[in-house]
């Protein structure tokens, strides 16, 4: 199975999302831990701490109550203090129960209970003593005769109350110490729990940070991937296609994905276009050749020759030209005796020889059946004469081999030379006349004339 | 623009949980309730917690003590005054989903009237002869005799409407038609959690969640107030710390009045207390004016009989038995109790009762009566004092308005039996003429004073304490109620 871009990008995106989800997960876990701990600390620990604190307060308050009881000068105050002590005692009992119900607290009830019970028993005893004292005082102060026994009893009661108060203070201290220890334990436990939470949250924070960095790296990776494997390739493709003549070799086709598949299609398409264009160019070249060349000899034709002459006439180049006209001698006889096909072969051979005899840059054209024209531009008149004469002699000496026979032909040539570009037509005309003269004077010869300005006028 | 919108949304999202997370309103009601069915107990603390919050009646009493339609939209009284036709509100749901129908009203009122039903206020509704369900949400109540107080009494907590499926379990899981339903009731810790009822027929209350606690222990209650845990405590009156709390700034104190008469109740079943001279002696022994010192910041009116000074028929009998310890001793001597009369004075945990009992015991001891002062829990008081009548003296406020009839009830915990009073009460209930009725009510007050049935001390003050910013609270308490529906935070 080939994995396309969609699958790859989706996979990368999924990876990014998964990492982000992981980050969110870490954050949620941290929040949950925080929440749970906070709930436990506020809901249970703090409540227990408050309960313990209240317990300490109330235990101390119980001693205050016994002091209030001690100070009571009448039964209203005595009972008020007693009520308060009873309320505190009742609440203390419930506070102890509540505290014991808390999982983190270990109060040894067997240690506390005797103290508490003794405290209460003492309070009740103090209440009774104070009650007696109030009554006795009333007797002592309001009765006419002071009873010595009453006074002694009052002294005894006062002493006993003092004892009780001191005992109660001791008991209360015992209770306070026991409960304060628990308060301290609870406080430590709360602190530890908070520290532990802080540590765990720090840990989660680090994990969260790493995850976020990872997510960021993944996002960068995804961008890089998309740029490298999607955008860059599309741009490369676009650049390749933007060229005037895009070449199949410029189209990047590597890879196994949608872009590669598209590039391959474009590559094929561009190849086809290229092929078709080449064909058209070839046909153009052929057409152009056919338009300017003679089909038989592959030399330029008359049409081309006339155009060149026209161009030369108008180009105003500061050159001197020589023009020659060449005609195969007695060609009609060749045609008549050997047939047109052989005649054509003769003309082809003639043309090959002529072309081979003249420099490459010389303008050479077949302008009639067996008539050829030559224009020299860069050669001197003498050079032109030498080329042409050399050709005439080669032709004369060298037979032309046809399929089953050998033919000897000659040619007459007329050369007129050294005229400026604007007079090329006059020059040609003079060459033609000279050719005629050569024919007249026995053929197989070169007639020439160095033209003067007078000749050209 | 977009940025602003997003910013606004973020702020809204951040602010929203803070808005939504206000703690439940914490109401403290002091006396622990025996259960949560106001139709089965005379304990006003149950009414305070449930009346108008969980349960509702055909009518209701508003903060000014006036009758208003509630579950009955309106009613027609026949010209002879003997037939009421109530037109019920449509679409009223109980908290268990049951609809309020005429049949439910008939069930509820018949349960109220059933002698075996256990409603302690049943005798207030003695005029009702028959209750009948009619078509088109209508209920007809036929009376034995015209009863001008019926509409008022149908608005009391004893007459709230309950439905057959839940009536038996209302003591633990109350189901009413009120704006709040019970989400949790911890009977051991006396904590009642209420939450706004989604299908409530009326407007959604401003306070959606409430916690009602009942802290009998004075020291604990005081600590809770000092710690700022309590948002509203409707009856703080005799607490020393009131003065300190008012200076703190976070609490506001309101002085209101109730219709509740504070009484030193005497059990007439006790041989000595059956003697009117002893009761008169006790009346003379007590300095009612000095006793008001138990309220550090309130000055409630004194009374001389079982009647509210706010009522038009009130007769001033405050000084019927002036404070006179000498006269008290004489009367005791006359009755043969100069020495050795010992009375068991059982005191409920209500703050006023606790505080008053200290002084009352002292007054009585000052004239030679031995007092066994005994504090009892509220359920213990309801059971042993109110129901089983195991007491000689107790101090309590009767907060039900216009409840003079309790002196005509047989087997009421006073054990006061007076044919004269019973006849007078019969006459009062049947008297249609307001002027004549007022006269008879005056006679009844005088009869109770003359008989020295109890020591009629003073009207119970309604000194409430609430957090600054909590509004809508009833300053006065014409009936025992804490209307959560009307409360809101400023």
Image (cartoon, coloured by chain):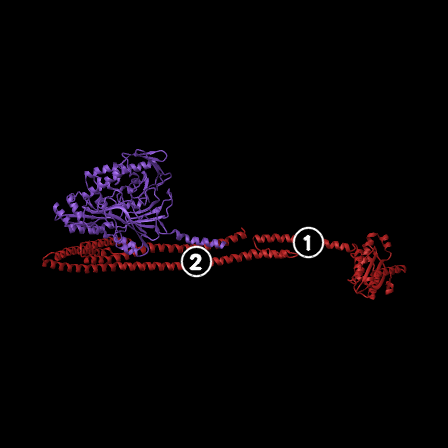
Q: In red, which chain?
A: A
x and y percentages locating residue A53 in the rendered image: 28, 57
Which residue extends farthest right?
A441
x and y percentages locating residue A400 in the rendered image: 82, 58
Q: In purple, which chain?
A: B
Q: Name the residue that disc number 2 marks.
A: A208
The crowd level at tag 2 (other Cα within 10 Å; few <14, some 14-19, many 20+) is many
x and y percentages locating residue A115 in the rendered image: 21, 57
> What chain does mark 1 sit on?
A
- Residue at image location 40% in from the left, 52% down from the top: B17
x and y percentages locating residue B463 in the rendered image: 28, 50
Q: Are marks 2 and 1 in contact (CB under 8 Å)?
A: no
Q: Is residue A43 above or below residue B103?
A: below
Tell me the tag on residue A277: 1
- Quarter of the image holding residue A308? bottom right
Q: Nearer the viewer, residue B266 or B438?
A: B438
Instruction: Tell me how many marks there are.
Output: 2
Q: Tell if the residue under mark 2 belongs to the same chain as the one under mark 1.
A: yes
Residue A106 visible at all? no
């Amino acid at each position: 199975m080939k994995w396309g871009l969609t699958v790859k990008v989706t996979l990368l995106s999924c990876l990014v999302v998964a990492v982000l989800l992981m980050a969110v997960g870490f954050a949620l876990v941290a929040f949950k831990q925080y929440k749970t701990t906070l709930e436990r600390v506020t809901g249970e620990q703090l409540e227990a701490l408050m309960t313990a604190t209240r317990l300490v307060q109330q235990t101390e308050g119980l001693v205050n109550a016994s002091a209030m009881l001690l100070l009571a000068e009448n039964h209203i105050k005595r009972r008020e203090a007693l009520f308060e002590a009873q309320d505190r005692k009742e609440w203390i009992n419930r506070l102890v129960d509540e505290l014991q119900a808390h999982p983190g607290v270990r109060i040894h009830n067997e240690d506390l209970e005797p103290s508490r019970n003794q405290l209460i028993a003492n309070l009740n005893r103090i209440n009774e003593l104070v009650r007696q004292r109030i009554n006795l005082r009333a007797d002592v102060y309001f009765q006419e005769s002071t009873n010595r026994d009453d006074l002694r009893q009052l002294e005894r009661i006062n002493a006993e109350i003092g004892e009780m108060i001191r005992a109660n203070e001791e008991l209360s201290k015992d209770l306070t110490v026991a409960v304060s220890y628990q308060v301290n334990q609870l406080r430590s436990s709360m602190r530890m729990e908070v520290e532990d939470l802080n540590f765990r949250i720090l840990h989660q924070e680090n994990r969260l940070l790493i995850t976020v960095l990872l997510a960021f790296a993944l996002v960068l990776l995804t961008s890089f991937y998309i740029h490298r494997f999607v955008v860059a390739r599309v741009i490369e493709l676009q650049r390749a296609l933007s060229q005037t003549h895009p070449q199949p070799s410029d189209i990047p086709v590597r890879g196994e994905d949608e872009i590669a598949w598209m590039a391959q299609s474009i590559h094929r398409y561009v190849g086809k276009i290229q092929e078709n264009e080449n064909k058209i160019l070839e046909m153009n070249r052929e057409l152009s050749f056919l338009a300017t060349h003679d089909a038989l000899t592959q030399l330029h034709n008359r049409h081309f020759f006339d155009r060149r002459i026209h161009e030369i006439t108008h180009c105003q180049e500061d050159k001197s030209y020589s023009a020659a006209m060449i005609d195969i001698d007695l060609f009609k006889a060749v045609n008549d005796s050997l047939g047109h096909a052989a005649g054509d072969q003769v003309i082809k051979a003639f043309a090959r020889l002529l072309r081979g005899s003249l420099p490459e840059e010389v303008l050479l054209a077949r302008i009639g059946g067996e008539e050829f024209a030559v224009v020299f531009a860069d050669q001197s008149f003498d050079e032109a004469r030498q080329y042409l004469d050399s050709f005439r002699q080669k032709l004369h000496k060298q037979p032309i081999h046809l399929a089953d026979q050998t033919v000897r032909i000659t040619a007459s040539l007329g050369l007129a030379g050294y005229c400026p570009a604007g007079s090329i037509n006059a020059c040609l005309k003079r060459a033609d006349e000279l050719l005629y003269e050569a024919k007249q004077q026995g053929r197989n010869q070169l007639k020439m004339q160095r033209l003067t300005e007078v000749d050209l006028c | 623009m977009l940025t602003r919108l997003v910013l606004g949304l973020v702020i809204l999202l951040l602010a929203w949980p803070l808005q939504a997370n206000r703690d439940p309103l914490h109401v403290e009601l002091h006396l622990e309730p025996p259960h949560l069915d106001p139709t089965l107990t005379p304990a006003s603390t149950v009414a305070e917690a449930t009346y108008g919050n969980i349960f509702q009646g055909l009518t209701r009493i508003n903060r000014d003590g006036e009758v208003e339609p509630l579950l009955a939209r309106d009613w027609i009284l026949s010209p002879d005054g003997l037939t009421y036709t109530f037109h019920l509100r449509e679409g009223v749901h109980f908290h268990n989903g049951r609809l309020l129908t005429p049949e439910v009203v008939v069930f509820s009122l018949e349960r109220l009237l059933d002698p075996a039903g256990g409603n302690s206020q049943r005798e207030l509704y003695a005029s009702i002869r028959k209750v009948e369900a009619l078509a088109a949400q209508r209920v007809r109540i036929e009376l034995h005799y015209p009863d001008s107080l019926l509409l008022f009494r149908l608005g009391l907590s004893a007459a709230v409407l309950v439905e057959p499926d839940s009536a038996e379990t209302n003591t633990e899981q109350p189901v009413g038609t009120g704006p709040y339903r019970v989400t949790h009731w911890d009977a051991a810790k006396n904590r009642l959690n209420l939450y706004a009822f989604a299908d409530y027929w009326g407007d959604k209350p401003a306070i959606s969640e409430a916690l009602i606690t009942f802290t009998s222990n004075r020291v604990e209650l005081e600590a809770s107030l000092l710690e700022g845990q309590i948002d509203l405590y409707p009856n703080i009156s005799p607490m020393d710390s009131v003065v300190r709390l008012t200076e703190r700034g976070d609490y506001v104190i309101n002085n209101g009045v109730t219709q509740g008469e504070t009484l030193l109740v005497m059990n007439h079943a006790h041989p000595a207390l059956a003697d009117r001279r002893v009761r008169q002696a006790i009346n003379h022994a007590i300095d009612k004016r000095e006793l008001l010192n138990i309220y550090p910041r309130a000055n409630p009116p004194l009374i001389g009989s079982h009647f509210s000074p706010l009522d038009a028929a009130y007769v001033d009998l405050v000084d019927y038995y002036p404070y006179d310890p000498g006269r008290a001793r004489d009367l005791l001597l006359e009755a043969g109790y100069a020495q050795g009369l010992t009375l068991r004075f059982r005191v409920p945990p209500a703050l006023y009762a606790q505080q008053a009992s200290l002084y009352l015991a002292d007054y009585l001891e000052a004239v030679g009566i031995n007092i066994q002062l005994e504090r009892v829990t509220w359920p213990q008081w309801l059971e042993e004092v109110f129901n089983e009548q195991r007491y000689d003296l107790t101090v309590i406020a009767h907060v039900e308005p216009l409840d003079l009839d309790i002196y005509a009830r047989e087997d009421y915990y006073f054990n006061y039996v007076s044919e004269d009073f019973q006849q007078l009460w019969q006459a009062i209930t049947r008297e249609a003429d307001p002027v004549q009725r007022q006269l008879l009510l005056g006679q009844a007050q005088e009869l109770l004073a003359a008989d020295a049935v109890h020591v009629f001390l003073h009207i119970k003050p309604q000194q409430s304490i609430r957090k600054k910013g909590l509004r809508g609270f009833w300053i006065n308490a014409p009936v025992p109620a804490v209307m959560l529906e009307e409360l809101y935070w400023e």
